[in-house]
Image (cartoon, rainbow, N blue to C red):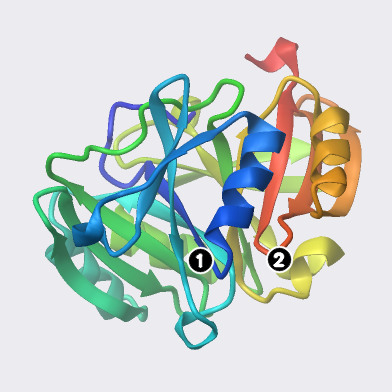
Amino acid sequence: MITTDFVHGAPTWLDLGTPDLDGAVAFYGGVFGWQFRPGGAETGGYGMFLLDGRTVAGGMTVTADQGAPAWTVYFGSADADATAKAAEQAGGTALLQPMDVLDQGRMAILADPTGASFGLWQPGQHRGFGHVTQDGGLNWVELYTPDVAAAREFYGSALGWGTFDVEFPGGSYTTVNPAGQDENAMFGGIVPLDADPAEAQAGPHWTPYIHVPDVDAAAEAAQRLGGTVRSGPVSMAGVGRLAKLADPSGAGFAVIKGDPEQT
């Protein structure tokens, strides 16, 4: 599960790049109850989404030439330079080489061999999430990839992940966990890209899942506020109820209410 223990290789941070930051603030405030605290001039407009005063994500304005609207998942690293080098040696690409972010930490943006992008975060003054797992916090992450076996090998080499296959009716699901931990520490999954039409059109990528008290209400709120329901809501035995959504600018994400029998 995702925690605030800031374990190497586990999700540590999440941020949104959007062409309409004011619109995103209104949208995510309406769907999740998040507030937004803008940064100063030294942050280039980067600010923090908060829930009850605890950090849940970051947000910033991006232009069309900087990239499409999207959420980026960051994985913790004790040494961002070494992890970035390991990722490149495993066939990945550094889209943004490791760099200091004031005194807050050190970051990099990488892409795996299929092009799915993700971030690294080496903590400084900003360690990462202040709230996860429960309502309004990151609860799960999923990689959509054309090659599950290659993804297991790449992320195992770059971040030290272990994997575990969970059997469901109709097939198995590959989960991932930090190095040295077992499946009880799973925080995400690896899914064949063609398994979900709602995700396939975006190409290889990571999708964050935010926990909510009511998936149907979150989907209705997203539509009311100008977003899109990409798929669902649907219930999955042993998992919970979930839906795939997008904000008004097109950044995709998912919401989930976990099965209480699995918590």
Q: Position of residue 67 (x, y in %)?
A: 51, 80
Q: Is residue 85 visible?
A: no
Where does the image place residue 236, in percent across and percent down from the top left? 85, 32
Q: Which residue is mark 2?
A: 250
Amino acid type, label 2: Gly
Residue occupying the point 15% across, 68% down: 99
Q: Is residue 43 left or right of residue 246?
A: left
What residue is shown with label 1? 151
> Can residue 31 be spotted in the picture?
yes
Instruction: From the image, state whether disc 1 or disc 2 is nearer to you.
Output: 2
Corner quadrant of residue 148: bottom right
Left or right: where does residue 80 sit relative to residue 258? left
List the single residue furthest toward the bottom. 65
217 up-or-down from 175: above or below? above
Q: CA distance from mark 1 to mark 2?
A: 26 Å
* Residue situated in front as seen by the camera: 220 or 226: 226
Helix, strand or loop for disc 1: helix
Q: Residue at x 53, y 25 (%)?
A: 133
What residue sits 78% from the left and 24% below the top? 238
Q: Earlier in the sequence, mark 1 or mark 2?
A: 1
Residue 177 in which image quadrant:
top left
Point out residue 259 in the picture as x, y percentages from the top left corner. Answer: 75, 19
